[in-house]
Amino acid sequence: MNAPENPQAILLAGLDGDNTWGIEHYVKRGGYSALRKILESGMTPEQIIAEVKKSDLRGRGGAGFPTGLKWSFMPRQFPMDKYVVCNSDEGEPGTFKDRDLLRYNPHLVIEGMAIAGYVMGCGRGYNYIHGEIFSLYQRFEEALAEARAAGFLGKNILGKGFDFDLFAHHGWGAYICGEETALLESIEGKKGQPRFKPPFPASHGLYGKPTTINNTETFAAIPWIINNGGEAFQALGKPNNGGTKIFSVSGHVNRPGVYEIPLGAPFSALLEMCGGMRGGRKLKAVIPGGSSAPVLPGDIMMDCTMDYDSISKAGSMLGSGAVIVMDETTCMVKSLERLSYFYHEESCGQCTPCREGTGWLYRMVHRIEHGQGRPDDLDTLDNVASNIAGRTICALGDAAAFPVKSFIKHFRSEFEYHVEHKRCLVPVDVQREGSRIYVEQAC
Amino acid sequence: MTFSLNEASRAAIDREVAKYPEGQAISAVMAGLRIAQEQNGWLTPEAIEAVATHLNIPPMAAMEVATFYNMYDVKPVGRWKITVCTNLPCALSGGEQAAEYVKEKLGIGFNETTADGRFTLKEGECMGVCGDAPAIIVNNTRLCSWMSREKIDALLDELK
């Protein structure tokens, strides 16, 4: 990974792959000093929340909600069962950033969660780790055992009377569990079907108790904010977009991977870090924030900076920072077909518009891709997508609709070509050549 | 077909139960089903019921979970379950070609098992390792990254 030689990194700084994840190395890097500082100086939860608010840290899981504000919703002064939950159910196509935090720097997440536990008066936390990379779950369990043995978790942490314990829970192959209330249902041992909100988790969460759920990377940013101050974190990024962000870049670039850069850095700089476009080909389109984010044409993307506000202004969203890069060999119809299949497959089946609508979307894009599209299909697609978005309990419905609407909006002529000529504008052998990867990485 | 959880599985499930508040043993059902699947190769109705009995929850509650999450196998699978991700980010980096190559080598399609019961092939949804494409997961827990034809050859040879 590129992190060790990346001077802009703070979350992935000073790491040497699989060799330095353990507690001994973490403490050597200054780890657990933020937790120590809080407990030894007697910093109050209110002071910490104020610091997090100053940092302009926004939720890294996709919604970009201000973390300090979210924390302030918790009834922190009431002594009762409350929970801190970490969402490491990273299954949105294109997203693989939390994997590097969990395999290379798991104690950073543990420290961030322990601080959150202190702030909100929670005695217990869970980290929900997606099942597909089982080794991450195993490593996190090992890291938890190390932290307990060293006195950073458990009863009377650092002798300061603070009790907090943390456990790992694994998923087993359900994208929907990345939705926070589905995730809670899943920890409770049920099908991962989202809950209606309100009530929000801050009042009625895990086991019906007040719960705060944040993304892995959000928790990981907390120790740095405590050690260096909210203002310093904010200054790393730009106003309203504090800090660095880990981007996971996939698709047609020379070096797909994980890159931590300051929010507000130009997209072109990120592309350069990835070694540019594979085979020097032309950029056609980018999905800037995971498969649920609207696609943007390459030229619009080249003018964007990588932060919540710039990407939102361009008509998409930064989401989880999952950047899917597509070059001129990409067939947009085929790409949308694959994404639509994904949402159809992963719909939990609870709400009719999503359960039925995602099937409609997939079948229509499938028939267009396979030369059986009808001229009015594009309008029907748009109509079905509009009738899903906003009409479901959770955001999976919107997530299925956004790609359809944006692909047709920006690449309508390509869809029309498919309908009219019953084949793709980009010859199939060119598409295949474009997706050919010259595997060089050792593993 | 009778099934009972062996001692190691029971101990592993009990360690999971201990993570949750008192009275919430049901939270360990996901891990319990995973452990039973590892013991038996796939989840027979009897295996699902054994997990439910061990956790003292209704069998239907365990069945709901087993049939909701994709990585539980509620139908027989081969000794080695090969899951290839073909989702968009992987497809842009050879995921589909890797799947085609595995199909060609094994002579089966997705959701099929070889006649000798050695391999089952599955199409994967996002595994969260898009930068490692083409990616393959073997028996749910072993992730294989950057799977070139040579590496697929070596992997399939190794899995007897």
Image (cartoon, coloured by chain):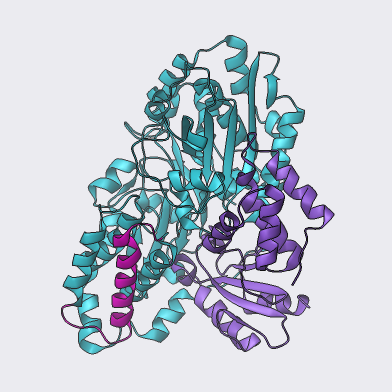
Residue A9 in sight from this viewpoint: no
Residue extending furthest right?
B7
Does B87 lie within the magenta span?
A: no
Residue shown at the point (44%, 28%) measured from the top left: A233
Residue B78: image location, x then y, percent: 69, 77
Does A367 lie within the magenta span?
A: yes
A119, A271: nearer the viewer: A119
Q: Is residue A236 above or below residue A386?
A: above
Looking at the image, how many numbered discs can be counted on the residues? Answer: 0
Q: Is residue B116 above or below residue B27?
A: below
Image quarter in which the N terminus of chain B is found = bottom right
A124 sits left or right of A243 in the view: right
Q: Which chain: cyan?
A: A
Residue A298: image location, x then y, percent: 30, 61
For chain B, the rendered hue is purple
Question: Which of the 4 image quarters holds residue A232?
Answer: top left
A98 sits left or right of B119 in the view: left
Look at the magenta stretch and give its main secondary structure.
Answer: helix
Residue shown at the point (28%, 41%) measured from the top left: A309
A271 sits left or right of A257 in the view: left
Q: Is residue A352 above or below residue A195?
A: below
Q: Which contiguous range is marked in magenta? A: A349-376
Residue A326 in sight from this viewpoint: yes
Question: Which of the 4 image quarters holds residue A155?
Answer: top right
Residue shown at the point (73%, 86%) measured from the top left: B116
Image quarter in which the C terminus of chain B is found = bottom right
B14, A414: nearer the viewer: B14
